[in-house]
Amino acid sequence: MSNIFIDYLLRVRLPITLFVIIVSFALTYFLSRGERDGIGYQPEQPIAFSHALHAGQMGIDCQYCHTGVEKSRHAGIPQVATCMNCHSVARKDRPQIIKLTSFYKEGKALGWVRIHKVPEYAYFNHSVHVNKGIECASCHGDVAQMEKVAQVNRFTMGACLDCHRNAPAKLPYLKNVKKGPDYCWACHR
């Protein structure tokens, strides 16, 4: 190869190539952030369920429907039978309740679409957090005001570590709250 060609590669081609790579990476990183973090994720559900009505206006506690949250690492998705505790009597003539009742009578599970999800490689235990007094809204947002639930907070390692390291500032409603563990094997088991 001639010196002119190598000089051209180093002075022109290399800087342009590096610039394109860096700009592409930066654009991809920032434009896909919502998708990576899950913020704004709001899937269609098989039944139009209003948390604003049930948890908000009616004041039904999260744990009435999400029964496993105090004892299990998973909050649990409510079974149709839980809904039917009230809807075998209340508002039976509404289209969504009629649909719900048909699932119940056929013994079918509702195919709720999961909204909030911690990555598979990370261990998270709902019961530990709930039993420490941490409110559901701290991670899930004010679901009681949501007609249709959406993810409003990041479920990333950085977000969890930020809360664990700054618990008194992040959870001011808890008295004498201590920092959470921030060593790797607390979550990566």
Image (tube, helix red, strand yellow):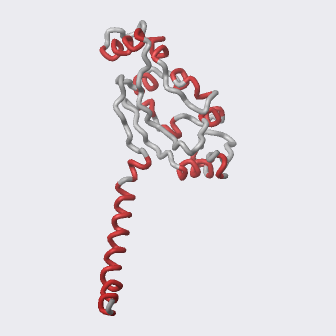
Q: Is residue 50 above or below residue 102?
A: below
Tell which residue pokes out farthest to the bottom in this image. 3
Q: Residue at x 43, y 42 (%)?
A: 152
Tell which residue pokes out farthest to the front in this image. 1
Q: Is residue 168 above or below residue 115?
A: below
**Closer to the camera, 48 or 102?**
102
In the rendered view of the protein, which quadrant contains the C terminus? Answer: top right
Please provide percent x and percent y for residue 151: 43, 40
> For residue 96, what is the image quadrant?
top left
**Closer to the camera, 173 or 44?**
44
Please provide percent x and percent y for residue 47: 36, 22
Q: Residue at x 56, y 45 (%)?
A: 121
Q: Would residue 115 be found to the left or right of residue 124 on screen?
A: left
**Closer to the camera, 79 or 2?**
2
Please provide percent x and percent y for residue 167: 62, 47
Tell which residue pokes out farthest to the top in this image. 89
In the rendered view of the protein, which quadrant contains the N terminus? Answer: bottom left
Q: Would residue 133 be found to the left or right of residue 1 on screen?
A: right
**Closer to the camera, 179 or 29?**
29
Q: Residue at x 32, y 83 (%)?
A: 9
Q: Residue at x 49, y 26 (%)?
A: 77
> For residue 15, what is the image quadrant?
bottom left
Please provide percent x and percent y for residue 36: 42, 49
Q: Is residue 180 above or below residue 2?
A: above
> For residue 57, what is the image quadrant?
top left
Q: Is residue 7 above or below residue 23?
A: below
